[in-house]
Image: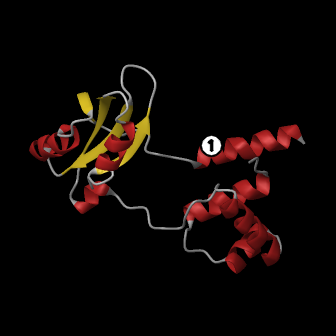
Amino acid sequence: MAIDRLDGRIIGLLAREPRIGVLEMSRRLGVARGTVQARLDRLQSNGVIRGFGPEVDPAALGYPVTAFATLQIRQGQGADVRAHLATVPEVLELHTTTGTGDMLCRLVARSNADLQRVIDLVVGFDGIVRASTAIVMENPVPLRIIPLVEQAAEDSGRRD
């Protein structure tokens, strides 16, 4: 779905102030309340905005260690491995990939020693043939979406 500049401004405002109301948003953006509500509804129904939940920091919850594990999966076991990994709370994300591995997962742990426990949970499943793990040392560019939103909104302005 393409977004325009107003959509981009709405998403940016929500990212900066997630508790802002529709009325205040419309006032700040200089558009009618109904316009903002219709745009939000459309952005949600098209899956651009997936939720309004809190952004939680795993480190603040006591999980300061982050690692990425590349997994090689036994042929035909992908669905079983996905189901297994979904039961491990320390698996924050799972992606199927091309290249040397079949899946890439982001893991968190309470310490480096605890990371061993998490890795054992992850790879202790018959469908996983091999795993390679890299521990995150620093996160200089945390997950960010707003620059992409701004670029998409700019791109739509160039197409008009």
Residue 67 in the figure: left or right of residue 31: left
Disc 1 residue type (three-letter): Leu
Asked if one can make out residue 61 in the rendered structure from this viewpoint, the answer is yes
Kindly identify which residue carries mark 1.
148
Mark 1: few, some, or many residues within 10 Å (few <14, many ≥20)? few
Q: Quadrant of residue 154?
A: top right
Residue 137 in the figure: left or right of residue 113: right
Counting labels gives 1
Decide which of 60, 82 is in the foreground and name it.
82
SS under mark 1: helix
Q: Position of residue 73 (x, y in %)?
A: 32, 30
Q: Position of residue 98 (x, y in %)?
A: 46, 24
Q: Position of residue 106 (x, y in %)?
A: 33, 42
What residue is at 34 percent from the left and 39 percent from the top?
105
What residue is at 15 percent from the left and 41 percent from the top?
120
Decide: is 100 above or below 12.
above
What residue is at 17 percent from the left and 40 percent from the top?
124
Asked if one can make out residue 133 in the rendered structure from this viewpoint, the answer is no
Residue 141 in the figure: left or right of residue 61: right
Decide which of 50, 37 is in the foreground and name it.
50
In this view, which residue lies farthest toward the top? 100
What residue is at 57 percent from the left and 60 percent from the top?
50
Decide: is 100 above or below 21.
above
In this view, which residue lies farthest toward the front? 76
